[in-house]
Amino acid sequence: MGIKKIILLMSLHFFLLTVVHAQKQSVPHGLTVNLLSRTGKVYLNGYPSTTPIEKAVSQRENFQFTEISARVPFFGWIVPAQKENTRQTAYRLLVASRKDFLLKDSADLWDSGKVDKNSSANVLYSGKQLAPGKVYFWKVKTWNQQGEESGFSEISAFKTAEELTDYATDRYPIQKQDEYPVKINRIGEIRHFADFGKAAFGRIRVNLYSDTGTDSVIIHLGETEKNGAVNRSPGASIRYSQYKIGLNKGWKTYLVTIRPDKRNTGAQAVLMPEYIGEVTPFRYCEIENYNHPLQEKDLVRETVFYPFNDFDSHFHSSDTILNQVWDISKYSIKATSFLGIYVDGDRERIPYEADALINQLSHYAVARDYSMARYTHEYLIRKPTWPTEWHLQSVLIAWEDYMYTGNTLSLAHFYEDLQAKTLMALSDENGFISTRTGKVTPEVLQSVHFNGEIRDIIDWPHTGILGLEKEEGGETDGFVFTDINTVVNAFHYRTLVLMAQIAETLGKTDDRKFYDKRAAKLKQSFNTYLFDHKRGVYMDGIGTNHASLHANMFPLAFGLVPEKQIDGVLKFIRSRGMACSVYGSQFLLDAIYDANDPEYGLQLLTSTGERSWYNMIQVGSTITLEAWDNKYKPNQDWNHAWGAAPANLIPRKLMGIEPLEPGFRKISIKPQPGPLKSAEIKHPTIRGDVTVSFTNNPGQSFRLEVDIPANTTAEIYLPFYTGSQTIYINGQSAKYIQKGNFSVMEDVGSGKWTFVVER
């Protein structure tokens, strides 16, 4: 074939791909029901199936599928955008009991008609009553501000649950995927050592041969290796297990069933669904006493995770360490999703609020999924854990759910629970709360659904093994516990601020005024009684002069520090380094970036010291650790997503992508690169992907390219160098508003934009 013909065929192929892509984008896509985007997907024993859901419901197979439990579901879609500044002005939504109706652009259950609204998310069903246990079909079309009408979307399906309720949060089934080793080494005559490249939760399936049917092999599974073999004594809570298989004659396939662990299958633990079976985290597999050749396809890891699209997000920068930190953090969110609910790792498999907040923000940033975060949040409202601050974090989680989804149903359903979670019942005349002054009554415990002792935590561990007051140093930077605790009250202040906004959102005006007043009072008391003006730092509490990193980073992260005191508090924070746990690092980096110190933020994110994310990679893990190193938490596990804060810190703070209005109706794009030369990111949102890239010559020039999804606007932050600088938008000189060290472009519409700042 001649070169001209090859070029012609390649050009034609590219043209056809472009046409297909354009056609796809010219109709609404990314359809969701109750925030779930794959409601018609069918699984068989955890594996994706090709059977349509309308047929699967009547076949005798062990199928799994998403079930919609609410009597009145809500719909969402991504608005097609082929022009700049595209806004939806109307939609038409059809719901039918049979696909045939929709193929004729009609519906027997609901034809919304042309609705003159810009809503593309959280559109409540308003048709005939849905029956339980039935499959339904729907599609949608939109109009833009030019009056242009899109085509109808592809037809999507969903099945209602066998019992319907007024409110519920549904999830996808857990998924399995077969993965093969990246390498297999034969060691001597009777041993094989396989590396799957990354650790994952799952079990092993092997194809083995026996001449006689009388021999047996030993399977070793583990998260770490030692001297070219699976480490039999890894220490801490790092996983290792072995299994003996008696072989039958000839070639046979053996599935190793994982033994339940007493601790992570106990009364409080979340259990694996029966169709998945028990799993264990492992990267390495060693087969002992096997003298036949072992091929790659003979060894299969049945890897388990909540459905996850690896292509939903992307990040790359000029800093190779930052790239590796992103990779391990993103992968950790996928790998630890094996239960469909955020848990603390494999040691206990129990949800905790502190883990859930970091998981939630990180999951939003790496995948277009909101169901797992909401389900975990609502689980924890009814089954909370013991730390004071973690009860308070339920309010923070609820607010992030609303900001990322724009959906008020969870806020409304759990409003009274969220009020109780502020722990305002423990407050004194100055607005401070305390768990140590006799106010934690049975009524208070009942209001937060907890049966036990609520205790302040600050960070974990406190000192020594499991915080049992040994001599070993802990992760609290020497925090001194008092009755009036600075960190606890910083969290309390944040809950009051957010409850005021939640009340406003739900139309509860009197409540909003009440919470605003309480927040203002606490802020005044906080800065009167807890701030040391002489040293310019916050003390750990009333009754101590000790000032820790935690007593300063939390007030800074939660907006308690007066403007004139920020530099002093930030200086103290810098002096302490990473004197907190991987959990505390979330709030430390939030505080640093919110105080506009990207140089120090980047320094911590890319640190190669022992207390760094890079250290997790260096010690050999492919999932983030529970602690910076085994020495800081001797019983730590190697599969703990609360160590994956960079998965959200890089998108939210370094690249600066956050919702300004609920459901990403308006987006803030505020990159803070510091000395970072270049970076690019793809960030999924409920309204479509946001892409951002920059080229940075610090102090001299800055180039920012963004692609904003339709039906949104953005506020763009660029560096401010001097009053004589010039800003160009798509090559044209433009005006801007100065806000501190930033040049701000307001109300930028959807589409591709290039901004250049020149000094």
Image (cartoon, helix red, strand yellow):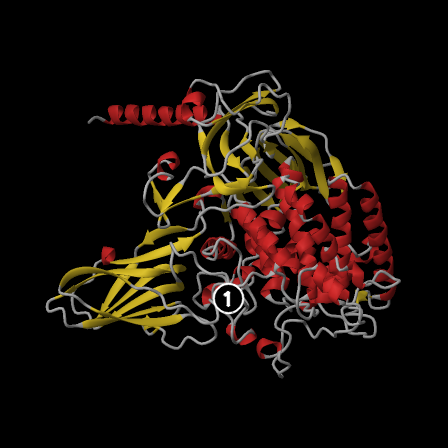
Q: Is residue 176 left or right of residue 396?
A: left
Residue 122, above or below 473? above
Task: Tell me the quarter of the image containing the C terminus.
Answer: top right
Residue 332, above or below 720? below
User: Of residues 354 and 381, which is closer to you in this image?
Assistant: 381
Q: Is residue 510 visible?
A: yes
Q: Is residue 31 left or right of residue 483?
A: left
**Residue shown at 59% from the left, 21% from the top:** 144
Q: How many marks?
A: 1
Residue 556, above or below 314? below
User: Of residues 643 and 302, which is closer to you in this image?
Assistant: 302
User: Of residues 566 and 286, which is closer to you in this image?
Assistant: 286
Residue with the most extreme left position: 211
Q: Is residue 487 visible?
A: no
Residue under circle 1? Answer: 615
User: Of residues 119 and 170, which is closer to you in this image?
Assistant: 170
Helix or strand or loop: what does disc 1 sit on?
A: helix
Residue 23 image offset from top left, x and y in percent: 44, 23
Residue 354 image offset from top left, x and y in percent: 62, 60
**Residue shown at 46% from the left, 43% from the top:** 66
Residue 390 image offset from top left, x and y in percent: 66, 61
Q: Quadrant of residue 22?
A: top left
Task: Tell me the quarter of the image containing the N terminus.
Answer: top left
Q: Is residue 625 left or right of residue 352?
A: left
**Looking at numbered disc 1 in the image, what kind of residue is underneath it?**
Asn
Q: Quadrant of residue 535?
A: bottom right
Residue with the most extreme top position: 147
**Residue shown at 57% from the left, 27% from the top:** 127
Residue 128 image offset from top left, x and y in percent: 55, 27
Instruction: Tell me if mark 1 has few (under 14), some (14-19) or many (20+) residues whose alpha carbon lies within 10 angstroms of its own.
Output: some
